[in-house]
Amino acid sequence: MRGVVLHAPGDVRVEEVADSEITAPTDAVIRLSAACVCGSDLWPFRGVDPVGRPTPMGHEYVGIVEEVGSEVRNVKPGQFVVGSFVASDGTCEICRSGYPSSCVHRVFMNEVGTQAERARIPHADGTLVATPDIPEAELIPSLLAASDVLGTGWFGAVAAQAGPGRTVAVVGDGAVGLLAVLAAKQLGAERIIAMSRHEPRQKLAREFGATDVVTERGDDGVARVKDLTGGLGAHSIVEAVGTQESMQQAIRSARPGGHVGFVGVNHDVALSGEELFFAQVSLFGGPAPVRRFLPELIELIWDRKIDPGKVFDLALPLEQAAEAYQAMDERRAIKALLRV
Ligand SMILES: [Zn+2]
């Protein structure tokens, strides 16, 4: 089968890779209906994360179940399924408490690589959610978004306690940040401040429910959020970048008693204990427990109440994955879908 392999920073190739097959009785094999490139795939692509050997890429996926292992009960061949970027058993104490992305048996799907024609899904019963029927083609981008970026933005908004009566600020205008805006709107936030300096992204943020746009960054961005909130800061901040600057901007934009949901994969962030002590904010984040939210997100998409697939502003055949990475790296595309 064909699959995307990163050979070295900047060197993405589509090549023949080993066929996906059942290796444990709890596995399923799916045929991808579409794949995509994630902002977090850019870390190894840029060489920020080391690339020690040719690495299969991709962790977001939707598709049709082709085969299941002998112990799989919840999904069957022929069903269309959505799963999280972390495979989880659904039965351990951590899964049952609502944190499947920290399942004691978790498998990060980038270890499998889902930018390919097929993928093996470990812990199929705990990981996959079947849709009510085979979706129409127009729903596939939104269902694919649910696999990671929507679920991650949603968790950011939940962790930040976005809700009625609250002002939410979102740091980061990538797909996750934009979908955190959508999530905050769905969760009933009163005011949503999107922090973005890119016009097409500002426009999408407004379509998703942003009431204000702040173009300044860093401490200037913090000052603008304070201006908009009577000098106090926002109740809820979603951090969707993962850098030192964005984490500081998020914490400093929160009012005392406020909540920061941080879902950008952190890279070399060091926080001052003294600043945190006096900030008096709650910090909660990490790899999003997407599987917890999937049934609700699939229903919202199925009923056409949300359209998160709008974050895909580029669609290319799988064979042109290298161009998809380039376009996202240069910020020419918000998020690239790969037609399989
Ligand atoms: Zn578990």
Image (cartoon, grey):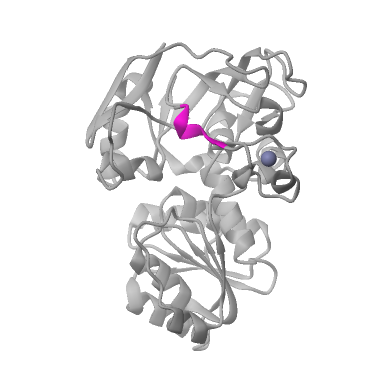
State the quadrant of the C terminus: top left
Residue 59 visible? The answer is: no
Q: What residue is shown at x 60% (from left), y 26% (from top)?
A: 122
Quarter of the rendering containing residue 74: top right
The one nearer the camera, 268 or 135, is: 268
Is residue 109 in the magenta section?
yes
Quarter of the rendered structure image containing ligand 1: top right
Q: Horizontal and vertical percent for residue 257? A: 61, 81
Is residue 250 in the magenta section?
no
In the displayed structure, 112 sits above or below 289; it is above
Q: What residue is shown at x 59% (from left), y 14% (from top)?
A: 22
Q: What residue is shown at x 70% (from left), y 28% (from top)?
A: 131
Residue 52 visible? The answer is: yes
The stretch in magenta equals 107-112
Q: What residue is shown at x 45% (from left), y 58% (from top)?
A: 240
State the quadrant of the N terminus: top left
The one nearer the camera, 255 or 208, is: 255
